[in-house]
Structure formats: structure tokens, C-alpha cells
Amino acid sequence: MDDLVKRLRSLYFADDSLLEEVADSIEELEADRRKTYEALLKVTRIHDELEAKLEKAVDALDEAVYLLRPDEKDMMRQAGVYRIVTTLAELKGQKDE
């Protein structure tokens, strides 16, 4: 790091415009880093909210299946109960990934 500072100082005396260009580039990179970090925080928050909603939906479907107590005949008809059971299985598989 000290070597870099010495080089920058020598550049300062050699060419002010080059030093300004380097300083501007560093500021731009820092601004981009901050924007990227803020975007990552937003994505993380959205992910966490969606995970919570998915968990709530899985719990509700679990309870629905328990209350409906589908038998083989219901499953063979592929009626609403069948869709609930298969959707629940898909969501549970997706949640485990």
C-alpha cells in the first residue's frame, strides 16, 4: 500500500490530470459498490419475504390436506383434492431445495 501511495504522489507531481482521473475512477467504483450492496440487500429482503409466504402457503395446504383426508378414490379422480395434494408435494420439494 505504501508503494502505491508513493507512486500516486510521484504521479501527482508528474501529471495532475492523471491523478484526478484515478481519483474519479476510485470514487465511481466506490459508488457502484454501494449501489450493488444496496441492491443485494433489497433482493435478500424480497427473498426472505417470499420464503415466509411460501412457508405459510405450505402450512395452509398441509392443514387443508389433513382436514380433507383424501383417500385413494379422491386421488384417482384428480379432483380439487388431488390438485391440493400434488401442489403441496411440489411446494415442499421446492422448499427443501
Image (cartoon, rainbow, N blue to C red):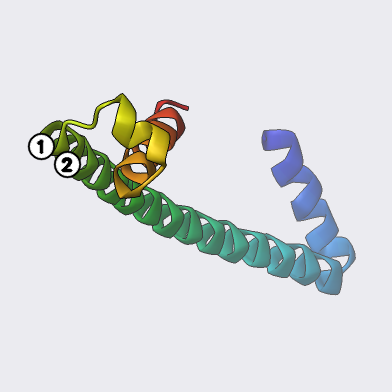
Residue 53: image location, x then y, percent: 27, 51
In the image, what residue occupies the spot 38% across and 56% down? Answer: 46
Depth check: give the residue in front, 7 or 75: 75
Amino acid on which disc 2 is placed: Ala
Quarter of the rendering containing residue 26: bottom right
Residue 1: image location, x then y, percent: 67, 35
Depth check: give the residue in front, 74 or 37: 74
Task: Give the class, few, some or many, for how many residues have Cα within 10 Å of label 2's Cα (few <14, many ≥20).
Answer: some
Quarter of the rendering containing residue 63: top left
Looking at the image, residue 28 sits to the left or right of residue 66; the answer is right
Looking at the image, residue 90 sits to the left or right of residue 45; the answer is right
Labelled pair 2, 1 in contact (Cβ < 8 Å): yes
Amino acid on which disc 1 is placed: Leu
For disc 2, the marked residue is 64
Task: Give the class, few, some or many, for how many residues have Cα within 10 Å of label 1's Cα (few <14, many ≥20).
Answer: few
Q: Secondary structure at mark 2?
A: helix
Q: Residue furthest right?
A: 14
Residue 57's tag is: none
For disc 1, the marked residue is 67
Residue 94: image location, x then y, percent: 45, 34
In the image, what residue occupies the spot 29% across and 43% down? Answer: 81
